[in-house]
């Protein structure tokens, strides 16, 4: 049986502080953000003008579509819109 | 809910399960990025989001739902190393070596065991210990939040640590579940 010291346990609890709330919320919103991204890309693929607007200012387009931008979502949007 | 059940529900498109999965492992992924690899905050945030994005994308292909924890740990470790390599200048196209903080990672694994144990010791013990040691809250703040007299918090912390020690040294088996 492994023995633990009280002080060691206290230090181990302190090793896992909460992640910043904004990071956690963004990760939790990921499925909804992905669905929003898919819908935005689908619309942009049908409409050349929209596609150009989205590519010109991706963050604004995300905001309009109520998608919380993360680096990976922005990268994916650029990649899919340019392919 | 077990990790395996949670992963299965996420795969079925259950948004609440996904929120729970992120909540369950957010501290773990954060600690690997910030505590073990010492990434600056902006890099750590990118890695954190990248890890959960890859996890979401890979859920349909996970071989063993119950092994989500080591899978996530490994993914986070690899993503941190890639990030550090990308940030360092390459010499003659050679791959930059990044040291794996083995001891720090082992401590984080043990810390997650402790955290999982905290959830099972009942009597608001997990909450009190987490607020005091992990969130650095004062007795007064803890007392206000949990509607307990601030003067009793120190003795509760002491009792809860003893309870946690007992639970860690004699963990429950599936046939003998924890109380509360």
Image (cartoon, coloured by chain):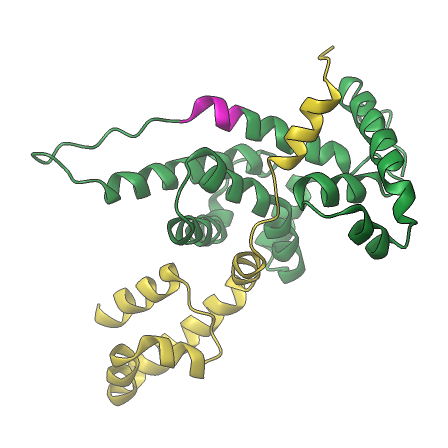
Task: State which quarter of the image contains the C terminus of chain A.
Answer: bottom left
Residue in view at x 45 percent, y 41 percent: B33
Relative height, residue B48 to residue B70 (above, below): below
- The quadrant holding residue B168 is top right
Indicate the chain coloured yellow by its letter.
A
Q: Main secondary structure of the magenta part?
A: helix
| Image x and y of residue B175, in percent | 85, 24
| Image x and y of residue B60, in percent | 50, 49
- The quadrant holding residue A25 is bottom right
View extreme (top): residue = A1
| Image x and y of residue A54, in percent | 30, 80
Q: Answer yes or no: is residue B172 visible.
A: no
Image position of B82 (left or right of B34):
left
Indicate the chain coloured green by its letter.
B
View extreme (left): residue = B92
Relative height, residue A70 to residue B154 (above, below): below
Image position of B140 (left or right of B96):
right
Relative height, residue B23 to residue B115 (above, below): below
- The magenta span reads B101-106
Viewer-closest of B16 and B125: B125
Image position of B55 (left or right of B172):
left
Task: Answer whether residue A59 is magenta in the image.
Answer: no
Task: State which quarter of the image contains the N terminus of chain A.
Answer: top right
Relative height, residue A57 to residue B17 (above, below): below
- The quadrant holding residue A15 is top right
Q: Answer yes or no: is residue A61 visible.
A: yes
Instruction: Tally the marks.
Output: 0
Residue in view at x 87 percent, y 25 percent: B176
Residue in view at x 34 percent, y 66 percent: A74
| Image x and y of residue B27, in percent | 58, 44
């Amino acid at each position: 049986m492994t023995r633990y010291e009280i002080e060691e346990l206290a230090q181990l609890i302190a090793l896992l502080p909460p992640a910043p709330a904004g990071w956690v919320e963004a990760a939790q919103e990921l499925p909804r953000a992905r669905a929003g991204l898919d819908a935005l890309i689908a619309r942009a693929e049908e409409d050349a003008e929209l596609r150009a607007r989205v590519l010109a200012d991706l963050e604004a387009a995300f905001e309009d579509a109520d998608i919380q931008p993360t680096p990976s979502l922005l990268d994916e949007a650029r990649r899919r819109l340019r392919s | 809910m077990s990790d395996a059940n949670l992963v299965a529900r996420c795969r079925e498109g259950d948004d609440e399960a996904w929120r729970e999965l992120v909540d369950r492992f957010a501290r773990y992924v954060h600690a690997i990025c910030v505590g073990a690899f010492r990434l600056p905050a902006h890099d750590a945030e990118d890695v954190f989001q990248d890890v959960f994005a890859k996890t979401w994308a890979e859920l349909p292909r996970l071989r063993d739902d119950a092994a989500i924890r080591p899978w996530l740990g490994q993914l986070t470790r690899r993503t941190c190393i890639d990030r550090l390599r990308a940030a360092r200048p390459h010499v003659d196209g050679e791959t930059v070596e990044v040291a794996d903080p083995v001891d720090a990672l082992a401590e984080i694994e043990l810390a997650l065991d402790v955290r999982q144990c905290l959830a099972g010791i009942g009597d608001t013990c997990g909450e009190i210990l987490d607020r005091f040691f992990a969130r650095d809250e004062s007795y007064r703040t803890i007392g206000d939040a949990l509607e307990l007299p601030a003067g009793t918090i120190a003795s509760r912390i002491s009792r809860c640590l003893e309870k946690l020690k007992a639970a860690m040294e004699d963990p429950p088996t599936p046939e003998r579940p924890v109380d509360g």
